[in-house]
């Protein structure tokens, strides 16, 4: 899709009508400005619709990748357009949740369409009573269990991209018959 040289696109602001009355009946001036109108009509159309270019649901498909690059989203070429629009629309929410269980679950759901269970060996606890025993030492491992037919390598790539750097990641693909494990 292109926004340049759209045949028959009328200009909302024809230059010939803006000329002084002296040139209103001048054929050369009117034909010359009509040529400029043809060139400028796509520019005016783009500027008139500029807010739509920044809305992931409305932006033209070729602008979607550009908009995604503004938000730091890496879109796959083979991702369906409607899913890519959803990813771009939710990018800020996912950035805000990055490094959390909920963020990783949402990222896996959005990128691969799978439900995940996160097992974190964290060592944080709180209590309102004094002298409460400390929690167990953190394991330093993040276990992600995913159900359904999915490529373990893709899941591991998404998990490693979203996992905090101080943790090691392990992925288990839970299927009906057997389980696959990835590190």
Image (spheres, grey):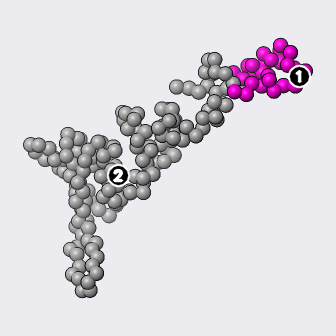
SS type, badge 2: helix
From the viewer's side, name the closer residue of 87 and 130: 130
Q: Position of residue 72 (x, y in %)?
A: 46, 48
In the image, residue 47 lies in the stretch drawn in magenta: no
Indicate which label's residue lies in the foreground, 2 or 1.
1
Residue under label 2: 161
Up/down of 162 relative to 39, above or below: below
For marks 2 and 1 on the same chain, the one whose residue lies earlier in the sequence? 1
Q: Residue at x 67, y 31 (%)?
A: 44
As drawn, which residue projects farthest toward the left?
177
Q: Is residue 36 magenta?
A: yes
> What segment is highlighted magenta in the picture?
12-38
Q: Position of residue 50 (x, y in %)?
A: 60, 38
- In the rendering, which numbered label is found on residue 133? none
Q: Which residue is mark 1?
A: 21
Whether residue 183 is visible: no
Q: Secondary structure at mark 1?
A: helix
In this rendered view, identify the residue nearer to me: 157 or 126.
126
- Which of these two is toward me, 103 or 17? 17
Callout 2 environment at 10 Å: few (<14), some (14 to 19), or many (20+)? few
Task: Please name the predominant secondary structure of the magenta segment in the image.
Answer: helix
Residue at horizontal 69 percent and vertical 21 percent from the top: 38
| For residue 109, above or below residue 98 | above
């Amino acid at each position: 899709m292109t926004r340049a040289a759209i045949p028959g696109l009328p200009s909302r602001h024809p230059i010939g009508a803006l000329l002084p009355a002296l040139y209103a009946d001048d054929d050369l001036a009117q034909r010359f400005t009509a040529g400029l109108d043809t060139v400028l009509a796509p520019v005016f159309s783009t500027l008139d619709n500029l807010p739509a270019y920044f809305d992931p649901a409305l932006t033209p498909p070729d602008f979607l990748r550009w908009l995604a690059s503004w938000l730091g989203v890496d879109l796959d070429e083979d991702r369906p357009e409607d899913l890519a629009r959803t990813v771009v629309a939710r990018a800020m929410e996912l950035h805000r949740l990055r490094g959390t269980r909920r963020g990783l679950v949402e990222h896996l759901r959005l990128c691969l369409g799978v439900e995940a269970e996160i097992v974190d060996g964290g060592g944080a606890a709180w209590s309102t009573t004094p002298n409460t025993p400390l929690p167990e030492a953190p394991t330093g491992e993040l276990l992600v269990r995913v159900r359904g037919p999915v490529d373990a390598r893709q899941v591991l790539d998404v998990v490693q991209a979203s996992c905090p750097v101080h943790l090691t990641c392990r992925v288990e693909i839970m299927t009906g018959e057997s389980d696959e494990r990835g590190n």
